[in-house]
Image (cartoon, rainbow, N blue to C red):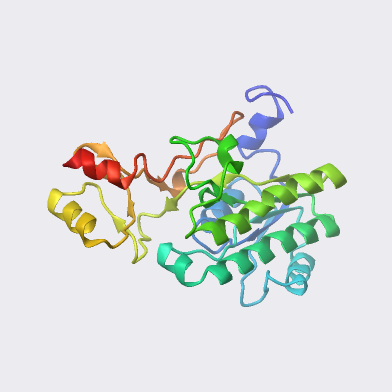
Amino acid sequence: MTAAGGGRRASWLDGGEYWRGRRVAVAGGAGFLGSFVVERLRQRGAAEVFVPRSRHYDLRTPDGIRRMLADARPDVVIHLAARVGGIGANRARPAEFFYDNLMMGVQLFHECWRSGVEKFTGVGTVCAYPKFARIPFVESDLWGGYPEETNAPYGLAKKMLLVQAQAYRDQYGYPSVVPCDGTCWDEMCVPEDIVVVDDVPPDLYEQYVNSGIPVDLYGEAFVSGMPVSPCLIVTDIQPTPGGDCGPAPALTESWSAVKDRYR
């Protein structure tokens, strides 16, 4: 593969030759991130984009996966399906989040290899990073500690795709890619347990700090001019030619530090 601007990598990033004529199955293609991926694949010339729905294919089971692959006959599988939710959902259903995500990822990957799918692409999560990672953290920090406990079942289930990808490449030479995304949201999709703000007024900030109730602040949030939580709109996600991936942290500073600075 040559460098961008002079060969195959540039063609792939521009969505030209690579996707043209290929059949692609996108698990989770009707969902939040997946719907935008499906749209881009069609724009870039994929011969057919197959979107399996959970009411027809249970991707937590080998039988559901095998039926999906038999029906789709894909050259490439992109796995974006997941059991996801906010902090409240992660606290209430950690077993479901662990089991469903682990079974979907591990078994879909294995069946793609077994049935001869040309390439598997999954997606990781920023929740797999250590709870006490340095700020800002980089890709090499991924294995430096245990994730934040609330998100750990989900994060570790998704993290196993990285282990599986390396193992199958080492033993079988099977090509796969498992990029790690950050926190994404859509301007029209705001979960009930998330506060999206452009600016945090002092009275609102004091209300949350003094209540003792954990609250996530998403968006371009500022407290006394200091950025608190960066946002990434899902349609702004773009492939990056080469180099390391450095996910943005959810918070640039601890809440205690923010509180002290504000006061």
Quarter of the picture holding the N terminus: top right
Residue closest to the far bottom: 55
Total numbered labels: 0
Residue 233 percent across, percent down from the top left: 41, 48
In the depicted structure, whether residue 29 falls above or below residue 140? below
User: Residue 134 at what x, y percent from top left?
Assistant: 47, 36
Relative to 64, 151 lies left or right: left
* Residue nearest the observer in this picture, 205 or 83: 205
Which residue: 22% across, 62% down? Answer: 211
Q: Is residue 223 something one can see in this rendering?
A: no
Relative side of 157 to 1, left or right: left
Residue found 20% across the figure and 57% down from its top: 210
Instruction: Give the answer, above or below, for where 36 lies relative to 225.
Output: below
- Horizontally, is 112 left or right of 215 in the view? right
Q: Quadrant of the C terminus?
A: top left
Vertical order, 253 against 123 (above or below): above
Q: Nearer the viewer, residue 47 or 209?
A: 209
Name which residue lies at 86% across and 46% down: 171
Q: Quadrant of residue 106?
A: bottom right
Which picture quadrant has residue 232? top left
Q: Nearer the viewer, residue 207 or 230?
A: 207
Identify the residue at image location x=58%, y=41%: 144
The answer to whether any part of residue 159 appears in the image is: yes
Q: Quadrant of residue 19?
A: top right
Across and down, in percent, residue 154 comes to: 56, 60
The location of residue 236, given as percent across then percent down, is 45, 43
